[in-house]
Amino acid sequence: MASGEVLGAIKISKSYPGVQALESIDFELRAGEVQALVGQNGAGKSTFIEIISGALRPDSGQIMVEGRAYPYLEPSKSIELGIQTVHQENQLVEELSVAENIYLFDLPGNRLGLVNYAQCQKAAGALLAELGIQVPAGRKMTQLTFIEKKLVSIAKAFSRQAKVLILDEPTASLDEKGKNVLFDIIRQNTGKGLGVIYISHNLGEIFEVCDRVTVFKDGKKVATHAVAEISMNTVVQEMIGRTTSSLYAREGGKAGTAAGAALEVEDFSREGVVDHVSFDVRPGEIFGIGGLVGAGRTELARMIFGLDPKDSGRLLLRGKDITPASPFDAIQKGIGYLTEDRKDSGLILGRPIFENVSLARLAKSLRLLLDLGRERGETGDISRQLDIKTPSLEQRVINLSGGNQQKVVLAKWLFAGSEVLIFDEPTVGVDVGAKSEIYRMMENLARQGKVIIMISSDNPELVAVCDRVGIMRDRKLVVVLEGEQISEENILRYSMGVGERD
């Protein structure tokens, strides 16, 4: 492996309102090496590679490319310098051919200035053969499988002379054969001096293909290690960091293991999306669902609420089948869904609080005309119960803080009489004080007999709040943790597939 530095970062920082995404990051990639970049959700990995690829500008710091310093890179400059990125989601034009996608920004032309399709297809065919990718260059993207499209995305990165290749979760959609093709491509090209940044939540792959591993946590670089000199457990522990004392503790401790089930989720499945998931929620408990982004957690919630189609699945509330056929049917049957993006799908930001609170209940009402006086009075009662801080219910929701916006979403579902409440990332964008308030409300609702399911990427939150935690990985529910099993380390290990091997 060559020892020269091909890419570096010096004191790179990036912040957003209220969030320090990256703080003084130093990074070095050598020519000919594969360096893993790992960290929990929100550790800053995506922000870092977006800065390197030119999609984001850092607030401060320098990017070094073959010894030359740049304050920031534009996407075109990044590509010109030989930095190529293969994103987790395919960025391909479906109606074009494989060859056209590979050379989309550098199509060969003839003397008349027209695209030379024959030359384009020939060059693409040669590149695919060199990389060992068995996909016809002339085939349309719409005719390919998802795995073949991923391989085309990888080939596209090699259509120009690449010095640095950034791979973001490259095997997330690949089968074993596709993964072997990718690893062969990596080994073949690092032997020629290519430097690779390899981002993956699959720690087994990192120990299989990477030379070094860099750990990010909370926007900071924790350490860089030679893979041969570190264990998988050490990487996990560094990703978690020191456990801080929780800002919230359940009053009287967590719920006991009550007999029977208040809610039964039976065999929810949809091919390629959710794989036969079943669990139950006991009376008085908060049931958490953890796992990495893309594991199928939100997709499961949307199927339970009737938003997305399913191949199978049944929902039983205290023995009664309440499986919804649609979101309207879910509301009628007492199911509430607090989506992960409250601003996009949970609220009408330009309308007043009282209208937002009454929205879901209107779907259950048979009245043709609104009684605005009664609506204001009743929504005022529940707003006061949840302590929504506002000078008036006429206040537009867009003017509220994140925590109070989330309370309005909760008020909406409680006002609608929901017995089952699914919280998807309930504290994203919420300050520390409001988080504790939301946890307390969830605890009180569970004690009142409401069925509470909480999906969260915040592992300390799951540990502090939940009585049991189901972990999803690769669209399956792989384990349900309870009691002393619920720890940040266990959640992370099972999310990444380390738990079963150990």
Image (cartoon, helix red, strand yellow):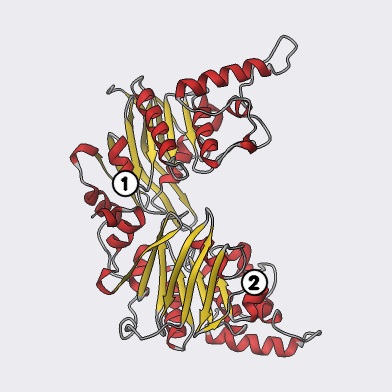
Relative to 335, say whether 26 is above or below.
above
Residue occupying the far top of the picture: 111
Relative to 202, say whether 208 is above or below.
above
Q: Quadrant of residue 409?
A: bottom right
Label 1: which secondary element:
helix
In the image, 478 versus 37, the foreground residue is 478
In the image, 211 versus 477, the foreground residue is 477
Q: Which residue is mark 2?
A: 325
Q: Residue at 55% x, 37% y: name it.
A: 149
Q: Which badge, 2 or 1, comes first in the chain's sequence?
A: 1
In the image, 480 versus 230, the foreground residue is 480
Category of crowding for the residue at label 2, using alpha-carbon neighbours closer than 10 angstroms: few (below 14), some (14–19), many (at least 20): some
Q: Residue at 70% x, 79% y: name it.
A: 363
Q: Is residue 458 left or right of residue 140?
A: left
Q: Quadrant of residue 383?
A: bottom right
Question: Quadrant where the N terminus lies?
Answer: top left
Q: Is residue 396 visible?
A: no
Q: Is residue 19 visible?
A: yes
Q: Quadrant of residue 406?
A: bottom right
Label 2: which secondary element:
loop
Category of crowding for the residue at label 1, using alpha-carbon neighbours closer than 10 angstroms: few (below 14), some (14–19), many (at least 20): some
Q: Residue at 42% x, 36% y: name it.
A: 177
Question: Quadrant where the C terminus lies?
Answer: bottom left
Q: Residue at 73% x, 17% y: name it.
A: 114
Q: Amino acid at mark 2?
A: Ala
Coordinates of residue 427 in the picture (x, y in percent):
47, 67
Q: Which residue is mark 1?
A: 203
Relative to 486, say whether 257 is above or below.
below
Coordinates of residue 373 in the picture (x, y in percent):
74, 89
Coordinates of residue 127 in the picture (x, y in percent):
51, 21
Alpha-carbon distance for marks 2 and 1?
A: 39 Å
